[in-house]
Amino acid sequence: MTQPVAVEFIAADADLLDAAEGRIAVFVGPDGQLDMLAKRVNRNTKGAVQKAVSDEKWAKRKAGEVVTLSYPAGNAKAVDIVVLDKKAGADDSRKAGAALARARGTDPVILAAARLKHAEEVALGAVLRTYTFTDHKTGDQGPVPAGLQVMVSDVDAATAAYAPKAALAEGVFLTRDLVSEPANVLTTTEFANRAAALADLGVEIEILEEDKLAELGLRAMLCVGQGSVSPSKLVVMQWKGGKEGDAPLALVGKGVVFDTGGISLKPAAGMEDMTMDMGGAGVVTGVMKTLALRKAKANVVGIIGLVENMPSGNATRPGDIVRTMKGDTVEIINTDAEGRLVLCDALWYTQERFNPAGVIDLATLTGAIIIGLGHEHAGVFSNNDVFCDAFLTAARAENEGAWRMPLAPAYDKQLASPIADMKNVGGRPAGSITAAQYLLRFVKEETPWIHLDIAGVASRAEHILHPKGASGWGVMALDRLVRDQYEG
């Protein structure tokens, strides 16, 4: 598994900068004023730092931009001058850290960050951007990224402030690793085993096998995986850090480890990307790791439905009718609309067993959400304004794009079936909305619920805090939601 680079906070000491042989990063606000550490680096570079920030373009640069002195005088290999106000918030601080990570490559670096209010956020941004997935590359991959040394005015305070950020990075990296793995490695069994490893951190783990799922009546979920030799599983992860007896927040993830579309086979072009169709389950697992590592004072249950959607002589066919755990019948129109079949049973099981304070499901559910929102925002659907607003506030605080989409009974007619209680698809118009309307039928009236369609954000092109590929979107927002709303 990919490990975040180490971060060490050290006392601000200008003398250490004189001897530094790697890279040095200094932080200068738009006003161009140098602090004590920047002045020492400026002296060592014979005034080059001051000259760079005195340029008329400096004040126009955006927070997080980096100007590199590639051949400074002295021992340092390079000096990175970062535009960042000393009172910059978390978002700008993380962007600055990410920009530094891109600039430094694998070189060792000292961040002269004593003037910054949020040095721990700069460190987090640098760590998140350093992620790379190389588990299946052979041969010499070159040097690995060195750790970060961060000079601060108060080492104890900075170390304490970074501790929950380190837990967050671990959760994000776990999610990215899971989403990045190929399906021949991350089978349903292997995924369940990786989730089960969280027991070492105090998470209570149960793995429900197919015989138990059949006994409980999760027939919709089982029908998705019946064409595969990989057994379907439901993994239950419980973190009990809150008051005994308090209803938990429930996170439910779609875990289709590979989606061929089943009998409704997808086109060959791009099908290799369907290794990421377990992205929702990956986020849930990453959040549970973060909560356990930072000993969150909240009760949270994570439930992931793990299946593989394959065509075979035993696969579910278009036109089949299945009965859900709730008891409703569903006419399968398209076997490629499988995620909602997994989620509807997982949602009902979650509510029946845990009576949660709220439920959030996450799924790479529809291509339609990408058409609507692109790759910057996840689609957010909810039956509860207060619950939804709390999540959107958390997502904004963590700069994870999320946009609320509508729900309305008028869309239900698209799901009407002449031979069953409903169809599993409602046609092309409003495809993401009708998928959410389908899931809403499996949410009890009294249960606050949010559905996150993360098809556009689970894996994407290079972004601020991650290279091309798995993003880990959602781990930070959900961790923030737990901290703000469910911890005393």
Image: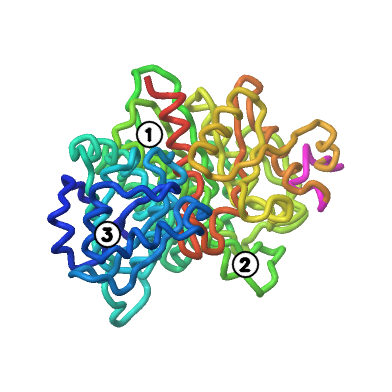
**Which residue does the image show at 31% across and 77% down from the upper left?**
141
Name the front one of labels 2 and 1. Answer: 1
Q: Is residue 420 magenta?
A: yes
User: Farthest residue in the bottom direction?
Assistant: 139
Q: Position of residue 129 (x, y in %)?
A: 40, 58
Between 77 and 98, the one nearer to me in the picture: 77
Between 282 and 121, the one nearer to me in the picture: 121
**Which residue does the image show at 54% across and 38% down from the upper left?**
396
Near mark 3 (Cα within 10 A), the count class, few <14, some 14-19 or many ≥20, is: many
Between the C-alphas of marks 3 and 1, the distance is 53 Å
Residue beneath label 2, please?
A: 312
Observer able to see residue 170 = no
Q: Position of residue 380 (x, y in %)?
A: 64, 39
**Image quadrant in which you'd find residue 476:** top left
* Numbered disc total: 3
**Which residue does the image show at 71% across and 58% down from the upper left?**
317
Between the C-alphas of marks 2 and 1, the distance is 35 Å
**Which residue does the image show at 37% across and 41% down from the upper left?**
86
Find numbered disc 1 in the image and state the secondary structure of the residue it sits on: strand
Observer able to see residue 193 = yes
Between 245 and 53, the one nearer to me in the picture: 53
Residue beneath label 3, please?
A: 42
